[in-house]
Image: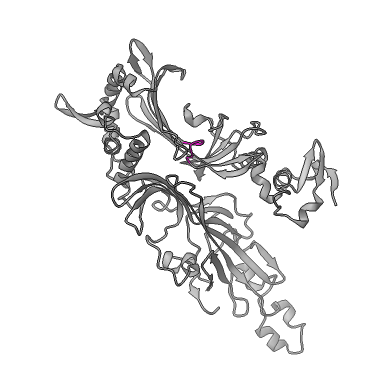
Amino acid sequence: MDKTFDAKELNAWVQQIGTLVNLISIKGNTAQLNGQWFANPWGDDTTHNINGIPYRPSELLTFIDHLLSPATDDLPISATANSPSGTALSWYPIKVGSAESGVSLVLSDPKADYSETPGYIGVGLCGTKNLSEGYSVTLALYLPLYSVDASNGGKVVFCSGNAPAQALLSLNSNTTGFSYDGTKFSTIQIQGTLGLNNGIQPTLSAAFLDDTENIVDSFTSLSYFLSSSAVTVINQALQEDSVNTCLNDPISSYTNTTPGRVLQAMGLIAQKDISGSTYYNVADLQEESSVETTALQTASDMVYSALHSLAANDAPLFPISVGEQTSTGGIYVVSSAQDDGSIDYGLRLVLPDIALGKMPDAKNGEGQPSSGANATAPQLTLQLGAWLTGETGYGDSWLARSSNPESPAPSPVPVPGANLYFLRCSSNGEKSFYLQGDLTSVGFDYIGSAAEPLVNVSGFVLQGLELRAEASVSYDPSQQDSKLTWELGGAVLLDNIGIPMGTDFNASDSEGNNPVVATSVSSGSGKGGDAGKGKSDAVNPPFSVSASYIVNGQLGVQLYDQNQTPTDVV
């Protein structure tokens, strides 16, 4: 039965979630409850409830916007500023504490009209490095992943011909600037797009921008670019001491690979001896492009050269410090050898312990968990690549416990994080774009404290909850009628559980006929006994338990003692 009431009676979050899942509808100040929703919360092909979220792009984008706001307003103008449908993009930086991680969730403008055009959800990478002498370098990459459409619902669109990846590289001079055919400008900008199917060829263009970011000249043709004096201008910029130093310095402290080596491997620049010193110049692109290859083949060769030169390093290419952890978080370039001899290349993002909330107020100095998952972490944390508490690696992980015992051991061994493979090199050296996305042990931790556990009811205590997921999707755009293939799994850890085996001390002498026996099995004083205070006693000992399952695998269960050590008995 539908019910109407004043929308002001609902919290703003309740309003958004309710309309997003079709539980309520709001017109003006009047809200109406969808009584039929409870008969089929998920929905079907004609009744779009929870399953209809992708059909509500405005509501979904607005909800995510409110979760992540504010969006950054510091983004270089380029193709990365607009979605494939032409609407503006909003970039929401993912922060580690107060520091920028360089990674952003990218949405189509939540305020745009999506009645006739799709909205997009994607990932962005953006970073600027300030050099000496007033120079700076900016790199931005936008990967559209998913489209939401009021008519057609949701669709994975990663780097499709209709939603290509978009990249930008710019060199800016804040002082002397550059000069081209008598015209002054301050920025050299190169941008390109790459789609993996529908026969769409990659695009690459260059532009010169003045101080107000107006385009002085643009180059969409390689022949026009090479025949102009633009090459001379870029070579002069490459020979500036600060730029040359940047090209020859390691990308990070975790690798000896330099930006110059990567760009040289891609065939974009080449070393040249000038007056006894070695500098980089624009490579002879006309010679490089004289071979009869398609633009897509050229792009795959260039991307392979870049990734292959970086994938040999096991450390993060761009480390991101997370709390006291200084080496696990970051962006990695990774490779994965396959059984047929081919090698997949891509990126891995690891961001454990990203704070999404704060601990509840401390009581009597007991505001932080004394043990258990994330003992000093905030209450709600995002785990973008972390095993469950008590697990040290794949061998004792929930993934291993839930895998099919008759299946061979995975190779390579799964590593926590968000992995995106997008290039495959076959055993005979042929390169092609290929999509595989893996979410390995990602999820959330919701952790209370010893003084304020999540649950403390009639002696039952639960201090924390950990959720993890495993999802793998692959897609080969080079194959005709290729479809997405999925692998799914999940795990839950109940952290520091206390189950009373008897009454508390205050009640023991007033219950039953034998106060001596009652006292010996009492669970301490107060709700939940001593487990509710983060302490341990014989009849109310804290313990943890995890349960996990993988599709086509098996159910895995593991007990942990009060020190988070795996055990068979508690």
Residue 275 position, x and y percent, is 15, 24
Residue 241 seen in the current view = no
Most prominent secondary structure in the magenta stretch? loop
Indicate the quadrant containing the C terminus: top left, top right, bottom left or bottom right.
Answer: bottom right
Vertical side of 38 occupied by 501: above or below: below
Q: Is 318 contained in the magenta span?
A: no
Q: Is any atom of residue 433 visible in this view?
A: yes
- In percent of width and height, residue 178 lies at 34, 17
Q: Left or right of 473: which side holds 272?
A: left
Q: Is 163 included in the stretch rendered in magenta?
A: yes
Residue 460 higher or lower than 92, as above or below = below
**Residue positioned most to the top:** 182
In depth, the one of 371 and 561 nearer the eye is 561
Between 62 and 538, the one lying in front of the other is 62
Count the numbered circles shown.
0
Which region of the structure is painted magenta?
A: 159-164
* Residue 452: percent from left, percent from top: 64, 61
Q: Quadrant of residue 306?
A: top left
Who's the residue at 51% across and 30% down the image? 81
Q: Nearer the viewer, residue 464 or 29?
A: 29
Residue situated furthest left in the rendering? 276
418 shown above or below 183? below
